Amino acid sequence: MLWYIQFADKLSGWFGKGFGWLIILMTFGVSYEVFVRYLLNAPTTWSLDVSFIMYGSLFMVGGAYTLSRGGHVRGDFLYRLWKPRTQAVVDLFLYVFFFFPGILALMIRGWDYAERSWSYGEVSVNSPAGVPIYQFKTAMALAAVLLIIQGIAQVFRCILCMREGYWRLPEEDVKETEEMLLHSGPEHEMTGYDSEKHKL
């Protein structure tokens, strides 16, 4: 189980970080559009569509990476008070009965949409530029496959937590700025939450 968890985390991380570079392209694309629209009075016909495609692809393909790092929104006002084994049982139930059926439906329908879109070279109808969107439809199917792979790893995490009584956390590769600032002072020592996290 551990080798699969590590494999899924690395795969999700590779795709998440790779697609994360789309933010840079989106920034340049939108900046260019603002420049030509408001300073040169010559708006582009493609900028809006391309921004939607890049943001949507980043959002969908990055979902597995976010799942692997526990970054999705969770209504945890009760959850955080439970023992890890209780959390694992609830998570396992939710993965089996809600997560996987929804993601399997996304994969099947996403594949259908992508196949149909590629068959006739679908382009966007929102602009006269005719920006191709079949690659975006493919991102839906890819995102679903990555989520299933990562979802299986999360199920394994639940099983291990039920056996061992603690969560096996993924390797930390990114930290929030405020967390770094909060714990950066010399007076801060490994106490409380940090010492527990370090121990895991």
Image: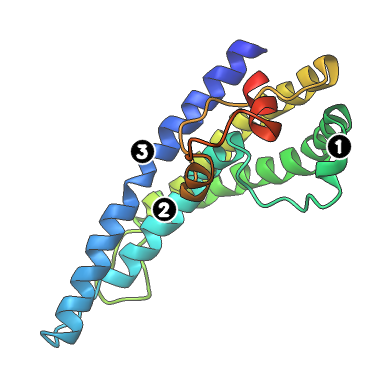
* Disc 1/disc 2 C-alpha distance (Å): 34 Å
Q: Where in the figure is residue 39, as x and y percent of width and height?
A: 13, 85
Camera-side mark, 1 or 2: 1
Along the line of sight, which residue is nearer the eye, 138 or 169?
Answer: 169
Which mark, residue 18?
A: 3
Q: Is residue 115 visible?
A: no
Picture quarter containing residue 30?
A: bottom left
* Disc 3/disc 2 C-alpha distance (Å): 16 Å
Q: Where in the figure is residue 85, as x and y percent of width and height?
A: 86, 27
* Disc 3/disc 1 C-alpha distance (Å): 32 Å
* Residue type at numbered disc 2: Phe
Q: Where in the figure is residue 162, as x and y percent of width and height?
A: 84, 21
Asked if the residue under mark 2 is in contact with the one under mark 3, i.e. CB atoms within 8 Å, the reply is no
Along the line of sight, which residue is nearer the eye, 124 or 121?
Answer: 124
Q: Where in the figure is residue 62, as x and y percent of width and height?
A: 49, 44
Instruction: Identify the residue position indicated by label 1 in the image.
Output: 90
Q: Is residue 189 visible?
A: yes
Answer above or below: position of 177 versus 172. Answer: below
Residue that protrudes farthest toward the left in the picture: 40
Q: On the rendered structure, is 20 left or right of 195? A: left
